[in-house]
Image (cartoon, grey):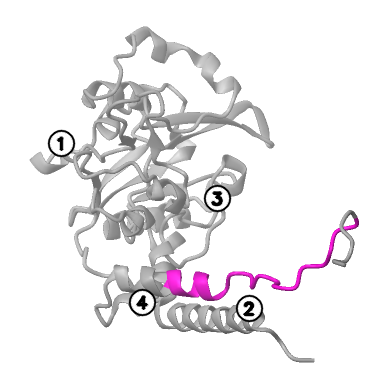
Amino acid sequence: MGIDRRDFLKRLAGIGGVALLGKGAKAYAGQPLGGFPDHLGVLVDTTLCVGCRSCEKACNEINQDLPRIPQESFQDMSVFDGRRRMSADSYTVVNRYPDPKDSERPFYSKFQCMHCLDPGCVSACIVGALTKDPSGAVRYDPWKCIGCRYCMAACPFQVPAYEYHNALTPQVRKCTFCFEARISKGEMPACVEACPMEVMTFGKRRELITIAKSRIKKYPDRYVRHIYGEHEVGGTGWLYLSGLPFEDIDFPKLGNTSVPSYTEPIQHAIFKHWIPPLTWFGVLGLLMWFMKPIENKSEPLSHEEGPEK
């Protein structure tokens, strides 16, 4: 039994797509990422956090583009009754988790943009509104943003938030790593400096990994033997230590390959010969025309019509 024109083209497209994806994944997946030897980062030791929310307060104060929140609001501990995530009005949040071994002492963990070494959001942005700075910060330029929100779909940590309430000039919002206000001036992020328990350590990423491994070795009963962010999605600028399994404190279980390592080979394969996008649109349009249903010229007579006499 043969196949018609439509089935043939569908199978041909499917085979080509699989071959292209397979070639790209094989060529790029797992390749070492470079270009940021002095990448700055923060090591977060969640076992030291007491949920004081000083980091949230400091973040709100340093980022003048955020809505002004009354300072006494950060003393409200009822927010820990439910899970929170970053929003267009909050670049960082702290959540509380029960300790199965000690009901009297819960665990707390701070969340914000992870500032990946190979960010999916940067790769997905078609206008360059998101860029990776050599310092390690993933920066955002609202004047370039067209609101496509591809960055939100590409982020494995679901960090970028959109200002849906802003009808005229909406922006994508996320932690800036205090780049303009502090990092570019040689200072540490506001949340790190404000923490009274010294939960966070700021410095070069490679040195933070050494510190984290040293703590795990010195206190093996205190920590899970894993540094979250050392390898996840190609590595992140924010690294975490925990006394609970990371999946128990809302950290997604991710592989070690960055998102762009899978997506960019496809883009590069398509455009490596500098074929203009309009050419591809034309090819796709031609395929759509070619694959449209063929009209049946000999339509059957309806029940209400009889044969012509």
Disc 2 vs disc 1: Cβ atoms closer than 8 Å? no
Q: Is residue 140 magenta?
A: no
Dot 2: what SS? helix
> Which numbered disc, 1 or 3, marks the residue that appears first in the sequence?
1
Report the Cα–Cα distance between label 4 and label 3. Answer: 31 Å
Residue on which the image places disc 2: 6
Q: From the image, state whether disc 4 or disc 1 is nearer to you.
A: 4
Nearer to us: label 4 or label 3 = 4
Q: In the image, is residue 303 above or below residue 30?
A: above
Q: Amino acid at mark 3?
A: Pro
Sequence-wise, the earlier of marks 4 and 2 is: 2
User: Which amino acid type is marked by label 4?
Assistant: Ile
Check disc 4 and report the residue beneath it. 270
Numbered range of the magenta stretch: 284-303
Q: Is residue 180 above or below residue 67?
A: below
Residue 87, x across and y down, in percent: 42, 30
The N terminus lies in which quarter of the figure? Answer: bottom right
Q: Position of residue 157 (x, y in %)?
A: 47, 47
In front of the other: 149 or 62: 149
Q: Position of residue 99 (x, y in %)?
A: 64, 34
The CA span between labels 1 and 3 is 29 Å
Q: Position of residue 8 (x, y in %)?
A: 63, 84
- The amino acid type of the residue labelled 2 equals Arg
Query: Badge 2, how many Cα within 10 Å: few under 14, some, many 20+?
Result: some
Q: Report the residue marked by disc 1.
A: 182
